[in-house]
Amino acid sequence: MDIREIQNLIKFVAKSGATEVKLEMDDIKITIKTTSENATVENGTYVQHIPVSVPQVQAAAPVAQPTETAAAPAAVANDDAKYITVKSPIIGTFYRKPSPDKPAFVEVGATVKTGDVLCVIEAMKLFNEIESEVSGKIVKVLVDDSSPVEFDQPLFLVDPS
């Protein structure tokens, strides 16, 4: 395994959202940890530290202002508490449209009923329709089209009133 393959593996792990991946092949051991923003590559007794940047969904506030950073998520959490979160039931790729030339299943402001299709998630070349479990109005789409999603990741906010 050369350095280019290792770098591609690190990028893939960072995009996937996994916090730790271990790979062992013959005489090479690779451990990638994204929580500490460092990846460790072990080959025998040699250890090399490779910086990994984990993509952020929201713009981060400057670290020098911890009071504003702590207050902002609390305010957002209180506003979102009245909404129902539709979460991903599987790991895969999130698509808002049934095909590239078709309109999105739902838009912000659309009224949905229980059983309406909200999106599709592709997993292992199968497109799984994700249906609404509640009736209400779509308030926010939390994932970009064609993005990878994890199990139990929030996808939509729905106002049930």
Image (cartoon, rainbow, N blue to C red):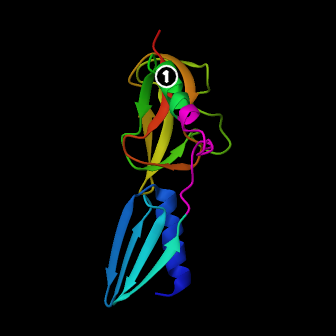
Residue at 48% across, 76% down: 49
Of residues 161 and 52, which is closer to you in this image?
Answer: 52
Q: Which residues are magenta?
A: 53-69
- Residue at 62% in and 27% down: 107
Does 65 lie within the magenta span?
A: yes
Classified by dominant secondary structure, the portion drawn in magenta counts as loop
Q: Pointer 1: what residue?
A: 80
Q: Could you say whether the residue bearing mark 1 is in a helix, strand or loop? A: helix
Residue at 41 percent of width and 69 percent of height: 32
State which quadrant residue 41 falls in: bottom left
Side of 45 where 158 appears, left or right: right
Tell me if residue 64 comes above or below residue 8 in the rendering.
above
Placement of 45 over or under 88, stated as above or below: below
- 61 or 39: nearer the viewer: 61
Residue 156 in the image, given as x and y percentages of width and height: 50, 30
Q: Is residue 51 magenta?
A: no
Q: Is residue 24 visible?
A: yes
Residue 131 visible in the displayed image: no
Location of residue 120 with respect to 77 vertically, above or below = below
The residue lying furthest to the right in this view is: 101
* Image coordinates for residue 72, horizontal then vertical, percent: 56, 29
Q: Residues within 10 Å of mark 1 (few under 14, many from 20)?
A: some
Q: Quadrant of residue 98?
A: top right
- The residue at the far top in this view is 161
x%, y% of residue 45?
A: 34, 89
Depth check: 63 or 76 in front? 63
Kind of residue at disc 1: Asp
